[in-house]
Amino acid sequence: METPYDDTEDERQEKRGCFECCIKCLGGVPYASLVATILCFSGVALFCGCGHVALTGTLTILENHFSKITTDHAMLTDIIQLMQYVIYGIASFFFLYGIILLAEGFYTTSAVKELHNEFKTTVCGRCISGMFVFLTYILGIAWLGVFGFSAVPVFLFYNMWSTCAAMRSPVANLTSIESICVDVRQYGIIPWNATPGKACGSTLGDICNTSEFYLSYHLYIVACAGAGATVIALIHYLMILSANWAYLKDASHLHAYQDIKMKEERELQDIQSRSKECLNSYS
């Protein structure tokens, strides 16, 4: 006897059909490309956002403590502004590039899933996949350089922070604190004729205690970590794209073999049918 709460057979089949449809949709999601895209977006966002704010803080520190004459650091100001514009371009480009690679992952996943059906890859599709492999390889090498370059300000700020920590240590109290200095001119950031160009003793300690120094130092560390995450994401992308390109290449070879085999089978059937007709005519 059927109760009002029991599902009918049609409802059970409908639920089963919806479940199978959901499983099929989830099976077509390129999870590897999705993870790489999330990692790439996160790394680029950290590098661009933190790097932009850290550059602004660095310029403020230099103007207030190391180069008080505007003409001495005019070129540095222009370079920092140019780098900030480049950051805007990097963020926009990788937002679009990540979406394109994710879409390409959906395409190649569908191609592999339909490998034994009527789905056929095209020469244009394989060329596009190969182009993405090459472009991602070039971007990976470029981001390795960006990662190394982003470590330079971390090193400079760490030297200044360690010098301030040395002044606060008990050993430093035995000597003259004013003899402990940091000269940023030796790093080539500002010219040698910039005034004052260096900070010593209590002035250096005051710089290390400013919010600009503390914030810029930690933002440079996060930006460097973001660049490293982007490098890992691009390496992940490169492995995925290489595997997908190999799958598409194998799929095209398999389809070509199947086409030749079907053509030969048709020709064989035609020959057999003609031979039977000839035998029937003689008989």
Image (cartoon, rainbow, N blue to C red):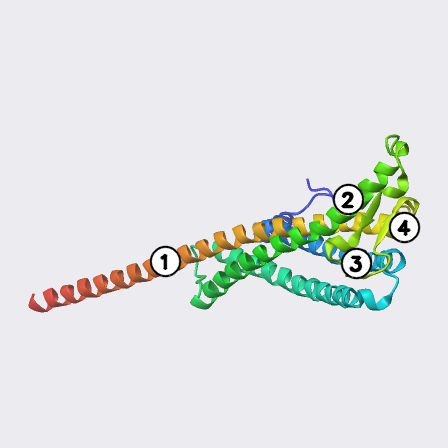
Residue 253 is marked as 1
- What secondary structure is found at the residue carrying circle 4? helix
| Residue kind at label 3, given as amino acid type | Leu
Where does the N terminus fall, quadrant-wise?
top right
In the rendered view, does 29 fall on the left or right side of 194? left
CA gap between label 4 and label 3 equals 14 Å
Mark 1 residue type: His
**Which label sits on residue 241?**
none
Question: Tag 1's secondary structure?
Answer: helix
Whether residue 30 is situated above or below residue 164 in the rendered picture? below
Tell me the residue that label 4 is attached to: 211
Measure the alpha-carbon separation of dots 1 and 2.
59 Å
Task: Say which element carries label 3.
Answer: helix
| Front position among marks 3 and 1 | 3
| Nearer the camera: disc 4 or disc 2 | 2
Q: Please tell me which residue lies in front, 12 or 58.
A: 58
Q: Amino acid at mark 2?
A: Asn
Q: Give the residue at the far left of this rendering.
A: 282
* Residue pointed to by mark 3: 55
Look at label 4 and name its amino acid. Answer: Ser
Residue 159, disc = 2
Q: Are marks 1 and 2 in contact (CB under 8 Å)?
A: no
Q: Are marks 4 and 1 in contact (CB under 8 Å)?
A: no
